[in-house]
Image (tube, rainbow, N blue to C red):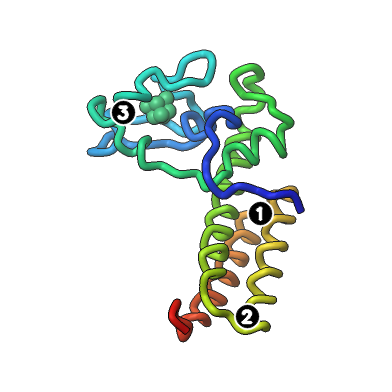
Amino acid sequence: MTHVSLQSDCASCAALCCMAFAFDQSDDFAFDKAAETACSHLDSCGQCRIHGDLDDQGFRGCRVYECDGAGQRVTQDLFGGRSWQDDPSLIKPMSRAFATVRRLHGLLVLLEAARKLPLSVVDERTRTALMVSIHKSVEDLPSDQRLDAMHSEVHAFLRSLRSYTLSD
Ligand code: SF4
């Protein structure tokens, strides 16, 4: 399996987080935005016009948001570098894929963090198998029901690791 980054690479993404998700006016966002709708601060090249001034403009939520590498994985691996900005018919499929892969990458981040624990051979084997299974499922884009099941499986495994400490 080629290396997959679990950190955002905005230069390789089609600004999915600025389009796919909704946000509500709050301390983190200066106005409401509907899901699957481009933010009005996004320019036609996929760049945020206020990127250098997010906090002062009331968009702290954008500054702290981390997609765990889901954005570039969807854009490059699943959609071959295409963008919904060039082809609006991609708005829905890219949004759905982004929401799904965002959840899967969130699980991968947790499993990657568990790698720092002094795991037994059996637990390390389970951790690795879960990561391989999640990576594979990115291409299949599992249903919400399947995602919930994977979420439960990963969290049950992580709970089973509570007896480990980093100094073990
Ligand atoms: S304010 Fe900028 S970073 Fe935040 S959603 Fe809009 S375009 Fe994206």
- Amino acid tagged 2: Asp
Quadrant of res 29: top left
* Residue marked by disc 2: 123
Judge by depth and name the residue closer to the eye, 165 or 33.
165
- Amino acid tagged 1: Ser
Q: Residue at x 46, y 86 (%)?
A: 163
Q: Residue at x 72, y 38 (%)?
A: 78
Mark in the foreground, 1 or 3: 3
Dots 3, 2 in contact, CB < 8 A? no
Judge by depth and name the residue closer to the eye, 40 or 118.
118
Residue furthest front in the image: 167
Q: Callout 3: helix, strand or loop?
A: loop
- Amino acid tagged 3: Leu
Q: CA distance from mark 3 to mark 2?
A: 42 Å
Quadrant assignment for ligand 1: top left
Q: Residue at x 49, y 35 (%)?
A: 17
**Circle nearer the N terminus (1, 2):** 2
Quadrant of res 65: top left
* Residue marked by disc 3: 54
**Circle nearer the N terminus (1, 3):** 3
* Residue marked by disc 1: 143
